[in-house]
Amino acid sequence: MSDLVVIAFPTEAKAEEVRQRVLDLQKEYLIELGDACIAVKQPNGNVKLNQLFSSTAAGAASGTLWGALIGLIFLNPLAGAAIGAASGALGGSLADFGINDAFMKEVAQTLQSGNAALFLLVRKMTTDKVLADLQGVGGTVLRTSFDHTKEAQLREALAGAPQAVNPSATP
């Protein structure tokens, strides 16, 4: 089961910096993410989503390949590639992986203009090491699906407060 974490930051750059830190932790196998997206509230009130994976582009690329191959069968690979790219892009734009886009836009509407929210869909994580790396990065926890203890630890880590050591935990 995955957990959802939403953290607000004063700028898009700060949210991107923290997302990059979390992605680096994923490379070290300390956290496994299902999605990591940044939503930015624009001055005009609209919300812009910065996603890691563009399903539209991936669909267009896949559609182009399959369309060209099918087009070869009918001796018109260029028309097949064009039709495949268009249908792949359409299919990709309709697909929504990870965190629901409508949910992210709804939450981001509550932000001040220019602020950003980092949405993380966490599949697994080594909590103590991840929180130690995020110590003092700032940000405000807007929503989580963590239990109260883990959520409090996350808030303390973001604020830069020293982590309480559990004496009953064994190394």
Image: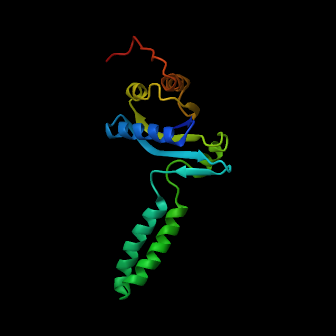
The image position of residue 50, as x and y in percent, is: 51, 50
Q: Identify the residue at image location x=53%, y=56%.
A: 96
Judged from this view, the residue extending furthest toward the top is 167
Report if residue 119 is visible in the image. Answer: yes
Front residue of this view, candidates 41 and 78: 41
The image position of residue 5, as x and y in percent, is: 53, 36
Q: Identify the residue at image location x=44%, y=75%.
A: 84
Q: In this view, does 139 lie to the left or right of 29?
A: right
The image position of residue 145, as x and y in percent, is: 55, 34
Q: Identify the residue at image location x=38%, y=30%.
A: 126
- Against 111, is 161 above or below? above
Front residue of this view, candidates 136 and 23: 136
- Against 85, is 12 above or below? above
Q: How many labels does the image show?
A: 0
Q: Identify the residue at image location x=56%, y=24%.
A: 148
Q: Is residue 99 left or right of residue 166?
A: right
Colour scheme of the picture: rainbow
Which quadrant, please, contains the C terminus? top left
Q: In which quarter of the image is residue 94?
A: bottom right
The image position of residue 116, as x and y in percent, is: 57, 41
Report if residue 120 is visible in the image. Answer: no
Q: In which quarter of the image is residue 29?
A: top left
Q: In this view, does 145 lie to the left or right of 17?
A: right
- Against 88, is 12 above or below? above
